[in-house]
Amino acid sequence: MKRLIPLALLAVCVPAFAAAQPIVVASKNFNESYILGEVVAQLLEREGFAVDRKLGLGGTKICYDALAVGDVDVYVEYTGTIAEAIKDLDGESTLARLADAVAPDGIEMLPPLGFNNTYAIALAPAVAASRNLRTISDLVPHGDLRVAVSHEFLERNDGWPGLTAIYGFDWTPTGIEHALAYQAIADGAIDGTDAYSTDGELSRDGLVVLADDRGFFPAYLAVPLVRAALDPRAKAVIALIGGTLTDAEMRDMNAAALGGADTATVAADYVARKGLGGGAGPRRVDADGFWSRLAGNTARHLQLVAYALVPATLVAVLLGVAIFKVAWLARGAVYLAGLLQTIPSIALLALLIPLTGIGVLPAVVALFLYALLPILRNTVTALTGIDPTLRRVALAMGLKPAQELRYVFVPLAMPSIVAGVRTAAVISIGTATLAAFIGAGGLGDPIVKGLSLNDTTLILEGAVPAALLAILTELTFEAIERLLTPGHLRAAASTS
Amino acid sequence: MNAVEFQGVGKRFDEWVFRDVDLALPNERTTALVGPSGCGKTTLLQLVNAVQRPDQGVVEVFGEPVPETGLVPFRRRFGYAVQGAGLFPHMTIADNVGLVARLEGWSPDAIRARRRELLDIVGLSEALDGRYPHQLSGGQQQRVGLCRALMLKPRMLLLDEPFAGVDPITRADLYPEFEQLRDHEEVTTLLVTHDVAEAQRLADHLVVMGGGGVVQAGPIDEVIAAPRNAFVRDLLASAL
């Protein structure tokens, strides 16, 4: 716990002397965002800035809040997302309007990178060629085509309903899970689907993207968001990327990553090809070797779990011991701990960012809160379940409350308390993989990266050690339980 | 001086269990407290060592009212044994018997000597000292429970149905052993029991409870010879 206090102080103080700190570059946890994060990071490095990468954070809210509190200096966002999801703007969202909207958060919007990652309609090349389809208007009379779109697209106002209103479709496509749509087209099961206009699959599979000839789909222009207080020289460097990236180029880079290329390498190629930045050449920090990466991730993972579990055990056991005699209080505390458990971990992490920033601290706080329930519940249940005759005898014998606890209640409850800690530990090891979403590292890091890259090897690099860690924890606790099991239970086990 | 005096004592949980109880328990005797279940026998017993507090009246023990504070040393002046013995399952026999003496700061030698003195009387050999309660028979556990109650040499022993739930043959062995212990320790005893025959066997003074109070109290022979009413007569008859 002691080591958490400096961390908390750090989180508070970082904005004050950020100039001396490396520039923190973040990204969300999908391919394109990783690549753009790398482009920004490498460009800054080529210009001589020190960079700290927090790539793969778990979503819009986490990235934006982290930027607003100053834990992150820059990440690439989309104009449509700023208008719809972050600021909920009505009416036309011009770049100037969006810039004004983020300014009160101490955030500055730099010029768009060039490409527009919006919705699109994509067709199998053979179909598009045989029917000579180039625009969405061309598609209207072809209700016989097997078009399947994502369920979300079918429902959203900026999806099919809006498209029908503008283009006058008199037919409705079927629904399909977006992740399956490209495979379905490749298999010839469907003829077309909705897409994001920079999806790597579009160029990988040579699909034809129909032009939005009536300009229906809102713009999702990629724009770097930076902290307004960031060094102006750094802002100028990031602004260099503005206008350099076309839809096709972004699509090709996504396709390369989809094909297994490292996002850092894809980004480095781009920066070099465009001749961005100074002449220092690609200065990509070479990825660590497998074993040292594994050791580092595992150590961080264990650190997260230990920092959460030790204080959670102390708090839950002491709380349980303090309140178990007051039935309504004990019930209330267990209920409250149960309520914490129902908050989805990503939501809890996102809620914590304004208070704690991103990184280790919110991850530890979240794991701590999740660990409370199993320990508290087992402690309270075990203590309240002690034979009332024994409680009466202890009282009548003249044991002081502290002596009752030490000599009778706690030893009798111990096996159950240890079982609660064991449950909490195993849950924590699983949940700690989500800490990667807020830049806390650990074994979740390769998992999150692997999920976005669809790279099974990378996913396993995190998942297998996490599973082994969970098993190892079970074994360790079995040993601890044997040590702490009161003599009568051990004797019972050996005689039976 | 009486061992215990109840002066206008009442106790209520949701409803009054009993009220206006005036009763004296003679010193250096064994008093049995009998009556149908739910009549408040156990509650009355627990008022003596302040495990329960009265809602009405005053309880005096050896001439002094039960204190408001300092209950831990007060409770240690009594021995207390219950049905099923109530031994702590995670402690050895030696630790069960010696726990409070250890907390009182007795030396290990003194604890061992006193423990052996008591356990020898009830015929439990030293070989059992390191066993856990579940490794003993029910009768052996109850003997340990009685010895634990007597460890600190109390002036008064409070027994709450300690012989209930023991099979009749074992119980027949336990009675004389209890009497040996009691006479060796010269301890005033209050025995709660639902078994009138047991009361006749072990006690010389009888208190009959029922209908929210004490119905009759006195030397056991007198009560048997002259039951105050049909309730007492029927209760006594159930044992004969």
Image (cartoon, coloured by chain):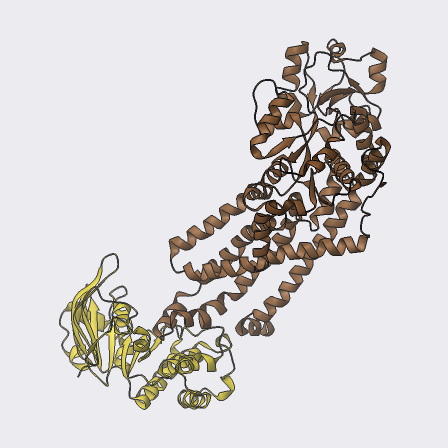
**Where on the picture, by quarter, is residue B199?**
bottom left
Between A359 and B69, the residue placed more toward the observer is A359
> Along the horizontal axis of the image, is B112 left or right of A428?
left
Looking at the image, residue B232 lies above or below residue A185:
below
Q: Where is residue A216 in the image (x, y as percent from the top left)?
A: 67, 15
> Along the horizontal axis of the image, is A417 left or right of B115?
right
Between B116 and A56, the residue placed more toward the observer is A56
Between B115 and A373, the residue placed more toward the observer is A373
Between B133 and A475, the residue placed more toward the observer is A475
**Going 38% across and 53% down the picture, which residue do you hit?**
A328
Looking at the image, residue B236 lies above or below residue A473:
below
Q: Can residue A313 be seen in this view?
A: yes
Q: Where is residue A293 in the image (x, y as percent from the top left)?
A: 77, 53
The quadrant of the image that shows the C terminus of chain B is bottom left
Which chain is displayed in brown in the rendered image?
A
Count of numbered marks:
0
Q: Where is residue B167 in the image (x, y as percent from the top left)?
A: 40, 75
**Where on the picture, by quarter, is residue A62?**
top right
Which chain is displayed in yellow in the rendered image?
B
Q: Can residue A423 be seen in this view?
A: no
> Along the horizontal axis of the image, is A102 left or right of A36?
left
The quadrant of the image that shows the N terminus of chain B is bottom left
**Going 59% across and 26% down the picture, which residue do you hit?**
A100
